Image (cartoon, grey):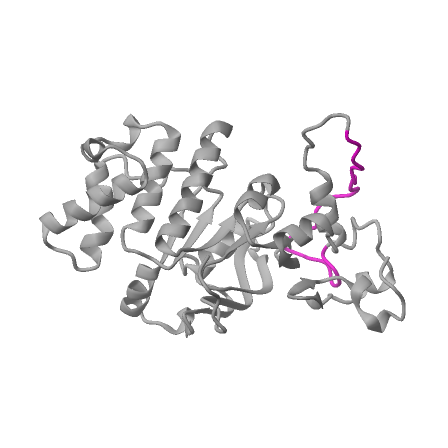
Amino acid sequence: MAEKHDEPLLDVQDLKIFFEKKRGFIKKEITKVKAVDGISFSIQEGETLGLVGESGCGKSTTGRGIAQLIPPTEGNVLFQGENLAGLKRGELREKRKDMQMVFQDPYASLNPRLTVEDILAEPLKAHGIRDRKERIEKINKMLDVVGLNRNYAYRYAHEFSGGQRQRIGIARALILNPKLIIADEPVAALDVSIQAQILNLLKDLQSEFNLTYLFISHDLSVVRHLTNRLAVMYLGRMAEIGDTEKMFNNPKHPYTQTLLSAIPISNPRDKKERIILEGDVPSPVNPPKGCAFAGRCPKVFDRCYDERPSLLTIDDDHQVACHLYDDSNGGEPS
């Protein structure tokens, strides 16, 4: 891992991403879907932050908002100290050389009409590398790096397996030598055996190229294998952030405790208490006034319904958004 610097490589400040939704045939009513509702976190150079939560909690939208593929409604995204929201189109394109994405579906993210050579050449052309010989050298080197035969450069995406396609997606993300990779569920569509290969490849590439990862996933077992720190989202809000191993061993937020209790155990003789939640996830169109998790939380009390909790630092860069840990409650956390 690279040595950490005082200034984070990525600093997300109160990010909000709302979508307008129209309802009604005669009288149109416009409502806002609060996909991401004011989250903040940072990533230091050389580390991997895992972003986890249930489907629909806003993880993927967060990743796309950071990359400016979806324009944020409010908030700042500082990358290398510069606010991406304030950049012009050309300036943002230059910044994207250092920030790339790997998507969940490796087939859908690859143009079926282009050969692998064409797919990998596109970002090189877009950023001024006009000499074909130079492009071919970079493409061949990158195919070697991700474990693919150089002859595959002349094939099309449909001729490859899912794991091979994802390697092509990773090669495309790496070919401009970025500093940050936003990996959005990069192994979710792959078989378990192939997942392990891709995860090991990502770890090796991080060491070789000094990469920083934002790793988005719903699979906590995968996240534990790859990440240094963990951020848990619920209904577009941040619930808990901290060191991965510390959070796995001693989760603080009731929602994090619930997620970790659902991880299957390898030894059937070991006993593990499963926390079963009641009720449904609230609607992002009309999120709760207080804590988003209040309606399902087994430790809820009156304040949770009325006041939205802030992220509180409770121990060595460990933050949790829960009133149980607020000293102003006048009591100990349960």
Percent x, y for residue 214?
48, 54
Q: Quadrant of residue 239?
A: bottom right
- As drawn, 206 above or below 305: above
- Tell me if I can see residue 107 in this picture: no
Residue 281 inside the magenta-drawn segment: yes
27 lies left or right of 172 = right
Residue 108 inside the magenta-drawn segment: no
Q: Residue drawn at (28%, 39%), measured in percent from left and top?
A: 111
258 lies left or right of 83 = right
The part of the chain drawn in magenta is 270-292
Percent x, y for residue 176?
27, 55
Q: Residue drawn at (34%, 32%), measured in percent from left and top?
A: 164
Magenta span: predominant SS is loop
Q: Quadrant of residue 264?
A: top right
Q: Which quadrant: the C terminus? A: bottom right
Percent x, y for residue 324?
81, 62
Q: Residue drawn at (78%, 35%), measured in percent from left and top?
A: 272
Count of numbered marks? 0
Q: Quadrant of residue 238?
A: bottom right
272 lies left or right of 73 = right
112 lies left or right of 76 = left
- Tell me if I can see residue 35 in this picture: yes
Percent x, y for residue 83?
42, 73
